[in-house]
Image (spheres, coloured by chain):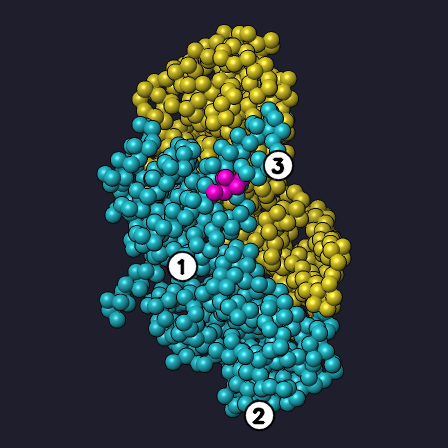
Chain colours: A yellow, B cyan
Amino acid sequence: MSKDLDKIFKPKHLALVGASNVPAKWGSFLLVNILAGGFPSERVFPVNPKEEKVHGLPCYPDLRSLPVKPDLVIIATPAATVPGILETCGELGIRHVVVISSNFSEVGEEGARLERELANIALRNGIHLVGPNTMGVVNAQVNLYAVGAPMQLRPGRISFVSQSGNVGANMLGWAMNQGIGFGKFVGSGNEAVLHSEDFIEYFGEDPETDLILAYLEGLDDGRRFLEVVNRITPRKPLVVLKSGRTEEGSRAAMSHTGSLAGADEIYSAAFTQVGAVRVDTSQEMLDLAKAFTRLPLPRGERVGIMTLGGGWGVLATDAVAQSGLKLARLDEEVMRVCDEHLPPFWSRGNPVDLVGNIYIETHLAIMEALVRSPEVDAVVVLGSLGTGTMIGLNILVSQNLIFQMSEDSMKAFFADLRGRNEKFLQKAVELMREHDKPIVFVEMQFIGEEYLRDLEAGRTVIFTSPEKAANILAKMLRYRKHQERTLTTG
Amino acid sequence: MSKDLDKIFKPKHLALVGASNVPAKWGSFLLVNILAGGFPSERVFPVNPKEEKVHGLPCYPDLRSLPVKPDLVIIATPAATVPGILETCGELGIRHVVVISSNFSEVGEEGARLERELANIALRNGIHLVGPNTMGVVNAQVNLYAVGAPMQLRPGRISFVSQSGNVGANMLGWAMNQGIGFGKFVGSGNEAVLHSEDFIEYFGEDPETDLILAYLEGLDDGRRFLEVVNRITPRKPLVVLKSGRTEEGSRAAMSHTGSLAGADEIYSAAFTQVGAVRVDTSQEMLDLAKAFTRLPLPRGERVGIMTLGGGWGVLATDAVAQSGLKLARLDEEVMRVCDEHLPPFWSRGNPVDLVGNIYIETHLAIMEALVRSPEVDAVVVLGSLGTGTMIGLNILVSQNLIFQMSEDSMKAFFADLRGRNEKFLQKAVELMREHDKPIVFVEMQFIGEEYLRDLEAGRTVIFTSPEKAANILAKMLRYRKHQERTLTTG
């Protein structure tokens, strides 16, 4: 049974101790972001003895003066004042506290002593304490953004614990830019009481979480972490970005959060054993986040590739082989469909090279043949979304040379292009559902981040290189194999 | 001495045989892109016996009817007609021809026979022939865009040969989006006469080229390639993206361009020996393109890191160590500057953790101290550009809660933010020049591709992850070491 952390992420009322009107203070950021994020202001209580109003809300001198007992208290006052405030929480029966304040164990022995005091008060009073020295907590599903950076996420079913506030905040910023839906986020800070594995365990049992992400620098209790993860991964994937991979990185981690990072190979082996999916970069973590929540898991290693041009097909083949996947054999039916739609000199093998074919019907027919084939476990589609764009732009430019194209007809043209792409992606979503196999897109033509996000619309994945696509499919397959093993043995 | 290919990239007059008004034809694309690209229309001669005008230009029935002898002929007619047209070029004394037409050796034995015929005619007549089956040629410095995709590049001093048209076109598209300046591009196509190494050799001697990029699938004459590259790399870097890394990829390459790809380890060893810089992905190639043309080469492996937040510092340290670089020791002067600007509990080591410090003066002072230090060969700056953004956005949001901010004051605010970042980057450019050391930025906060490109303004490099920054610095250092070796031994 995980700890009851619901009130950290779904408080009915929350108090912010140290709320401030001074723009550059955390007590200001936090309140501003909470309100701007859409959390109902009548459920938010600023606390500060020196203010009557903070950012337009009535302010209270201390926790005892509040008209209701808040189920979550967020503290952003100087370190020395935090133990006293925490004692008051205990006396008032408040069991969920987030300590944003810094200057604890991360700054030396005096801070460490203060942090031990916090932990003792929390344990004596049964307080679930997040932090100290944390970036805060988010729950996009209830518009709770008690964090230092302003944000508004697409609500989703991914939950994320980060041992670094800046890594966490930047990941959420990217998720926002890339349209990835998130649910709960917590910066675990110095982990005086609640540890990363406590949040992972909670997310594991949380019915609103389908996928768990963790940024880790070190673990105090590796055994408990592994035991927790081992229980979760048969049901939900956990993606881990673990820094301190090198000796130098370990030392930097130690000076950052004071955690003992430990030998990297031991971590890697342990992660594999308990089915955690390890990634090397934050972008890879976000790519996997999209893939796990939008695509079916591949059931095997055989990849069918279709490509608008030969060069990308070669790069994709390399990428597939290097990531440990295999090229699928094209069966008779796939060959028949390709023969029907492609010129006689087509590649007659995998990758299927469409040699610049511009007809959406051809692309659709071959994608469908590949995904239907019993020889194929996953499909990689290169350049199909862009094909209309290139030709279209050419035509557009050519028409402009002959007569001035009106703005309306230009808009109509781009709407038409977009319609083609959406038709294509819609078909892919249907085929994935019908055949329970992933189809991933790789698009390399003049597509910006924003257009890509709009096209994905939260339901497909478009990569910007074949290497990324192959790597992500390989990691999904490895997770699926782990699941299968635990199902048969456990 | 390289072959005289000047007229391919700087023709006085060019003729396009097969010019067409039919939008979906190559003969239309090409002309449209040439004209839209800004090449003077009075120097362009469409040839097509069935048309009187093509895209507004007077059209000629054949090459013999042209009012001038063009120094470049581009052919986009059906394969069977190409030998005859090439014979005419020979008779007219035209020595530079680009054959866009496909259906040669890439489609089978009949096509291969036709391709041998082309080669024979070209050799007999001393014609420098590009292709067949090529995407075309570009020279951004003279607004020549004789290619299948519409584009307009920032003119620069990078030249690029690609054995794949689609890889080439997409790379140029990305370069355009990312504001990377390019000079000459050529798709080498089936390489019936001119091979990749001929273009590399030409770029090596080209006074308008500072950096050479090559996408290769295979080499017909590996010995000549290595001999050419060996002569170039002491003066100019060559960055190679070589596909067919795996057995599967080799087979795909063979079916794509018919080239024999060969064992990858042999290529890798050979590239290292002659000082070519090998990359794994197209994005890495573009990152290196920016770095080589905008930054001084690092003279050693000692990297100084400054970071707005500890977590990113740990990831950057890992990245530096994994790419074979080392963390620099902070000397007394750096320690003094940090002590002066940072709180007493600062990390007192490399990475220098600025713990969210928001003062641009602090960031500037520490960047300057690091680059001045004799212990530091390269500086990585994480989060400094974003810091104003995050705080600023918070303040902005907070003000909006209290009073409606006018559009003008919002604009003024963002202009101010931008000014801070530009000041920062300007200082970095000056310091790089003064100390001849690279400073690279890593920025992870809410920065889109477009904003990033504008900030870089063609003179600095901003990466979106510490791993990319470390990898690029390591590859630049490896190239510099090669240069040093050849200077002392050769």
Looking at the rendered structure, which numbered label has been put on residue B304? none
Q: Which residue is mark 1?
A: B292
For the residues marked 3 and 1, what is the alpha-carbon distance in whole angstroms?
40 Å
Name the foreground residue: A234 vs A345. Answer: A345
Tell me which corner region of the image, top left, top right, bottom left or bottom right, holds residue B19: bottom right
Answer above or below: position of A360 versus B85. above
Q: Quadrant of the N terminus of chain B?
A: bottom left
Provide residue B259's location: percent of width, then percent of height.
51, 73
Q: Which residue is mark 2?
A: B91
Provide residue B102's location: percent of width, then percent of height.
62, 76
Residue at position x 38%, y 48% from top? B428
Q: Does residue A61 appear anywhere in the picture? A: yes
Residue at position x 58%, y 42% from top? A177
Mark 3, other Cα within 10 Å: few <14 / some 14–19 / many ≥20: few
In primary-sequence order, the first of circles 2 and 1 is 2
Q: Which residue is mark 3?
A: B407
Local secondary structure at mark 3:
helix
Name the foreground residue: A233 vs B100. Answer: B100
Residue type at tag 3: Glu
Residue at position x 51%, y 10% from top? A62
Mark 2, other Cα within 10 Å: few <14 / some 14–19 / many ≥20: few
